Amino acid sequence: DLLLSNSCIPFLGSTEGLDFRTLLLDEERGRLLVGAKDHIFLLNLVDLNKNVKKIYWPAAKEKLELCKLAGKDAHTECANFIRVLQPYNRTHVYVCGTGAFHPLCGYIELG
């Protein structure tokens, strides 16, 4: 219904089935951070498909192998699923991912 009434703008940036999980709205700067499987997207709130910025952040290869050896599914469990997007200060966001069952965190500079 929303598409038919032109009441929404679908995000066309990824057709890879990236399993979007985490959102952080930054109304002050007019952007949306989206955490997904192995990716973090920075989107413009006015037009989600304009100037999309993407960070590719996969789990380390050795962690992927350990995950598979533990009997986990390589496609649905052994990846870096972004779970935390938290404002840290005016210039950085704190980010954490599952890291193929070996959690890892870091900071993203939003400049």
Image (tube, rainbow, N blue to C red):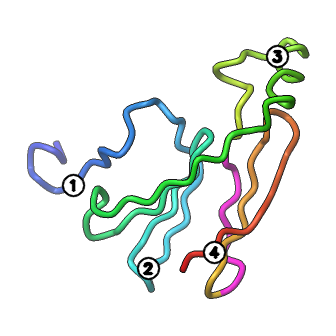
Distance of mark 1 from mark 4, alpha carbons?
A: 29 Å
Magenta stretch in the rendered image: 81-89
Instruction: Locate residue 58, reporting x and y percent.
Output: 68, 40
Side (left or right) of 73 relative to 4: right
Name the residue rendered at 79%, 40% in the picture: 99
CB of mark 3 within 8 Å of CB of mark 4? no
Q: Amino acid at mark 4?
A: Glu
Question: On the rendered image, what quadrant is the C terminus found in?
Answer: bottom right
Residue closer to the observer: 44 or 2: 44
Q: Earlier in the sequence, mark 3 or mark 4?
A: 3
Distance of mark 1 from mark 3, alpha carbons?
A: 39 Å
Given this view, does label 4 or label 2 mark the residue nearer the observer?
A: 4
Q: Amino acid at mark 2?
A: Glu
Instruction: Locate residue 1, reporting x and y percent.
Output: 16, 42
| Secondary structure predominantly adopted by residues drawn in magenta | strand
Name the residue rendered at 34%, 69% in the picture: 45
Q: On residue 27, which mark appears?
A: 2
Q: Secondary structure at mark 3?
A: helix
Side (left or right) of 98 relative to 91: right
Q: Secondary structure at mark 2?
A: loop
Distance of mark 3 from mark 4, alpha carbons?
A: 32 Å
Given this view, does label 1 or label 4 mark the residue nearer the observer?
A: 4
Instruction: Locate residue 70, reporting x and y percent.
Output: 90, 16
Q: On residue 105, which mark appears?
A: none
The residue to which callout 1 is attached is 8
Q: Is residue 86 shown in magenta?
A: yes
Compared to residue 34, the image places residue 29 above or below, namely below
The residue to which callout 4 is attached is 109
Distance of mark 2 from mark 3, alpha carbons?
A: 40 Å
Compared to residue 37, the image places residue 29 above or below, namely below
The residue to which callout 3 is attached is 68
